[in-house]
Amino acid sequence: MVIEKLLHERSVSSSAAPLAFFYCARNSAEPERSDPNQVLRAIVKQLASESVKLPIRQALVDEYNARVAKYDALDECDINERWALLSGLQEIIQKSKQLVKVFASSREDGDIIAQMSAVPNITIRASDNGEDIRKFVESEVNRMICTRRLLHGRVSEKLKSKIVSNLSSGAQGMFRWVSLSMQSICDVRSMKVAGDVENAIGKLPSSLRGLYDIIYDQLPIATGDSENAKELTTSQVVRRTFNWILCAQAHLSTAAFISALWIPDADEDAVDNLTKDQVLDACCNLVVHDATADTFRFAHLSVREYLENRSDFNYTYQYGMALSRCFQSFDSPNVDFSKRDWDEEPFTIYARDNIVSHYRRVELAGNDISQDQRILPQNIKTLVEETLVGCCFEKWISAIKKEVGREALTEVKRYRMKQRVCSSNSQWIPLRKGNFALGK
């Protein structure tokens, strides 16, 4: 709302100060959105020009006597690096010859509070947005009744009033809590009659984590479907979707993301026929589709935080899964590397560019394997060794050459890479019989 107001002011006044804004986010596929250096570069770029189609302003200081910078979700910046952003902003404000206004929104993390203690602060507490919460609850309840998602639309005024009252008082200022509570009481599998809903709203957890536990238990992933299934089940779709969003190292288009969900020995037609809506339906609103970015993402940062704190989701498994899938893309019978258009396969470009990144993370994760009894998707040691001495490695090298347009990797470099990966000095730590993880 703040940004929209400022943009509107600029649209109606040619003398309004230049505006720059940045939405921070913690996402492994978009690391620049939590990198203080990238944040500051983006702000400078916006202040320097009205549009990418227009030239850089020649003298910002002479033209304007004020500038405004807006940062949203500052707490999602890298926790070990965001001090640099805060220090940089303070230095800009102190040393600028002209007026610089900075508006930053954030959760109350300790390091941010400490660094911002000397500047004016506006704290929004649960009591401050109580009326907004109530209006949101009323709107959501009416929407669920009109769309017949809540008890097929058959909700008495008495029950409706009770739902609005309980959710409004229990939200504690959290719109996300309201959304998750509504999702819980609209579950058609367990909410059959009015008594079920009344009982549920009286037992709603006070925390987001408690609500996520309820929703997670409703997922097919929690019903015990085998992770090593040979067919692409709903359980597999959910688990691999969560894992890919958690560990992706670069942007995955919708087509590439769905391709990434393929599992070894499964029918590839099952993935080809998988739709965006099926993925979203399987994930029970914990995942949304970003049409602008053409990708899947978590519905809220708290979803990522919840899964990161679950023992059944960990980086060891995630990067092993991703590494396996990257290798498999170069062994796919559907990709003809003798043709120039092989890189039209949606996932292959991602695999080409990020296979080394995933390998390095599997290797680093090996330090914690002894405490982590998760099984990697395949025998990673065997997979790496067989791939790097076989045709898959040659295909990958060809893909890299095609991208850089020159002989980027010599025979010596190839030999050294193979020695690094397949060295007898590498430490392989067995998890279970037939399954290994990469050590240091």
Image (spheres, rainbow, N blue to C red):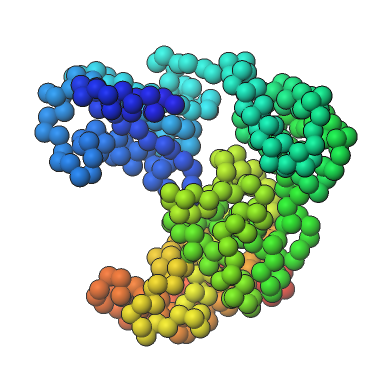
Q: Is residue 257 above or below residue 117?
A: below
Image location of residue 199, percent across then percent down: 86, 33
| Left or right of residue 204: residue 263 | left
Given residues 139 and 314, the one toward you in this image is 139
| Left or right of residue 427: residue 157 | right
Image location of residue 35, percent across then percent down: 39, 42
Q: Quadrant of residue 281?
A: bottom right
Q: Quadrant of residue 74?
A: top left
| Position of the N terminus by quadrant | top left
Q: Quadrant of residue 94?
A: top left
State the residue at coordinates (77%, 27%): 160
Q: Is residue 417 above or below residue 247?
A: below
State the residue at coordinates (36%, 77%): 341
Image location of residue 404, percent across then percent down: 27, 70
State the residue at coordinates (82%, 35%): 197
| Left or right of residue 203: residue 412 | left
Image location of residue 51, percent across then percent down: 23, 40
Q: How many marks?
A: 0
| Left or right of residue 362: residue 352 | left
State the residue at coordinates (67%, 49%): 284
Residue 404 visible in the snapshot? yes
Given residues 29 and 149, the one toward you in this image is 149
Q: Is residue 357 above or below residue 332?
A: above
Residue 355 visible in the snapshot? no
Given residues 80 and 298, the one toward you in this image is 298
